[in-house]
Amino acid sequence: MRLDGIHHISCITGDAPANLDFYTRVLGMRLVAKSVNQDDPYVYHLFYADHHGSPGSDLTFFEYPGALPGRAGAGMVYQIVFRVGSSAAIDFWAARLAAEGVVTTRDGDTLDFADPEGLGLQLVVTSVPDAPLIADHPEIPREMALQGFDGVRAYGGRMTGSRRVLEEVMGAEPVVEQVWRLTGPARTGWIRFDAAPMEAGRPGAGTVHHVAWSTEPAEHELWVERLAMGGVSSTPVIDRHYFRSIYFREPSGVLYELATKGPGFTVDGPLEELGHHLILPPKFELRRKEIEARLTPLPDMAR
């Protein structure tokens, strides 16, 4: 069994309208699903991805209106790395982000910046065989567009344990010091652990909640057994509507999820209509009017 790179990354926002504007209008991602937290239906769960909502491109946000800014610390991801196709794409993004008032730092073929709530982001030119995962956008040529995740950077803590779980349980390959790569039949992705700052982390707006790694649906139940055999405590398989999920916290504290590649976002309807309507888990459908009244108003993406 091999994990097929990063499936999705879930984060926290305190301002869904501004978050939607930045990730769709500025970064050119597509809103493929507008739903709610299955554990709290008054919390938005927004899903941004490529045109098809492919695993490997899906960045999601839970909205807690007015949430205080968070701060990444030990056991937390502090930067999300996206692929782009060329140095010309880095040039394009440096200019586009500057025009939006976003401060960037360029180092060769990498570009560092943050979203409006401080979430660390990076664009990097890579040469991997993975298919580019692109969303169409009227202002962003396809050759300049984001192409899906490359990896994540986290602050470590108990690195002996983190290394054991990555290599012996999850099947990750060490690349260079403190960097591990997970490569499956379709995609590859990596995680890097850096020394944690002295100041303790604090969850909040602009922080990462968890990183999900991609699994084949037929192998999902086997991962519960493999984790248990490796001494890792995990949840049972949970139905998340768009995929099935297993959660566990690795020794440094990063929350991992193993998510299946299907059934995918088209369970909600035709591909071209994804993200146009609020999708509620069936158990909340009878409370739709009440829930909609409590959620932050968002622009109509069907226009």
Image: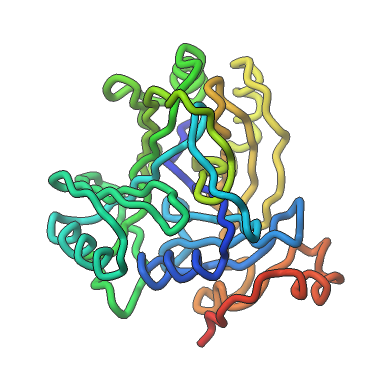
Q: Is residue 254 above or below residue 86?
A: above
Q: Is residue 281 visible?
A: yes
Q: Residue at x 60, y 57 (%)?
A: 263
Q: Give the farthest residue toward the right.
A: 286
Question: Residue 224, located in which quarter of the rendered image?
Answer: top right
Question: Residue 282, located in which quarter of the rendered image?
Answer: bottom right
Q: Is residue 259 left or right of residue 35?
A: left
Q: Is residue 240 above or below residue 298?
A: above
Measuring from the top left, give residue 222's x and y in whole percent. Answer: 62, 30
Q: Is residue 88 left or right of residue 297?
A: left
Q: Is residue 215 visible?
A: no
Q: Is residue 220 left or right of residue 169?
A: right
Q: Is residue 105 above or below residue 3?
A: below
Q: Residue at x 50, y 68 (%)?
A: 18
Measuring from the top left, give residue 257's x and y in whole percent. Answer: 58, 38
Q: Give the farthest residue toward the bottom.
A: 303
Q: Give the farthest residue toward the top.
A: 160
Measuring from the top left, give residue 45's x and y in whole percent. Answer: 62, 59
Q: Residue at x 39, y 33 (%)?
A: 191
Q: Is residue 92 above or below residue 186?
A: below
User: Residue 198 or 277: which is nearer the viewer?
Assistant: 198
Q: How is the image coloured?
A: rainbow
Q: Residue at x 44, y 43 (%)?
A: 6
Measuring from the top left, give residue 126's x and y in whole percent. Answer: 21, 46
Labels in figure, total: 0
